[in-house]
Image (spheres, grey):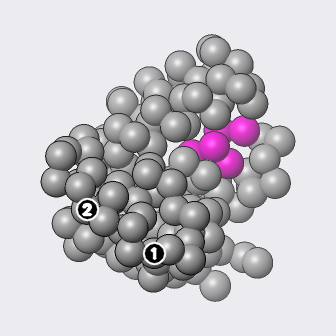
């Protein structure tokens, strides 16, 4: 069962972009299907410059330079995607989240996502990273 709500903004994490981009990723088919559904439901896709940096590095190591660059270009040219720049306040909030959750291994990138989601009032995340659910966000699921 899908949790996609029409016209609701969805935060897109590195794990989702990586799964969509890499046909060998275990979540590839599901991720592509979810992305198609999000676009069809006119859900604004929100991500950050930190996610793009993390994604580019991941695709460089798992795939190759050409694909890593093309994915960046595709995201940049997407009419459905808005890239939010992490600012000083977001980073300060992220560091507070890391300090607060002593039982979790949230990365600085994850915590900046959480800070931006809080700031923008976004509650849904397209991610295969359980840290988003641990923090309390709703993960977009389709199928298993």
Task: Give the SS element for disc 2.
Answer: helix
Q: Counting residues from the N terminus, which is met first, the one under dot 2 or under dot 1?
A: 2
Q: Is residue 116 visible?
A: yes
Task: Give the SS element for disc 1.
Answer: loop
| Quadrant placement of the N terminus | bottom right
Left or right of 24 in this view: 61: left
Residue 55 rendering spot, x and y as whole percentages: 55, 37
The correct choice, above or below, for 105 with respect to 17 in the image is: below
Residue 20 painted magenta: yes
The part of the chain drawn in magenta is: 17-22
Instruction: Tell me which corner region of the image, top left, top right, bottom left or bottom right, holds residue 26.
Output: bottom right
Instruction: Tell me which corner region of the image, top left, top right, bottom left or bottom right, holds residue 11.
Output: bottom left
Residue 108 rendering spot, x and y as whole percentages: 43, 51
Left or right of 55 in this view: 42: left
Q: Residue at image x 25%, y 62%?
A: 93
Q: Is residue 80 visible?
A: no
Extreme-top residue of the structure: 66
Q: Residue at image x 26%, y 45%?
A: 86
Residue 93: mark: 2
Question: Mark 1 highlights which residue?
Answer: 101
Residue 135 rendering spot, x and y as whole percentages: 46, 77
Mark 2 surroundings within 10 Å by alpha-carbon count, few (fewer than 14), some (14 through 19), many (20 or more): some
Residue 8 rendering spot, x and y as whole percentages: 31, 72
Residue 38 painted magenta: no
Q: Residue at image x 46%, y 57%?
A: 110
Left or right of 87 in this view: 67: right
């Amino acid at each position: 069962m899908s949790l996609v709500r029409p016209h609701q903004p969805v935060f897109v994490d590195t794990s989702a972009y990586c799964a969509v981009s890499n046909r060998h990723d275990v979540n590839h088919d599901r991720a592509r299907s979810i992305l198609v559904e999000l676009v069809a439901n006119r859900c604004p896709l929100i991500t950050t410059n930190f996610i793009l940096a993390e994604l580019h590095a991941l695709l460089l190591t798992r795939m190759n330079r050409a694909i890593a660059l093309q994915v960046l270009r595709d995201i940049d040219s997407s009419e459905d995607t808005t890239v939010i720049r992490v600012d000083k306040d977001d980073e300060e909030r992220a560091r507070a989240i890391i300090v607060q959750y002593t039982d979790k291994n949230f990365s600085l990138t994850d915590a900046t996502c959480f800070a931006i989601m809080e700031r923008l009032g976004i509650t849904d995340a397209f991610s295969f990273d359980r840290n988003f659910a641990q923090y309390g966000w709703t993960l977009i699921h389709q199928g298993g």
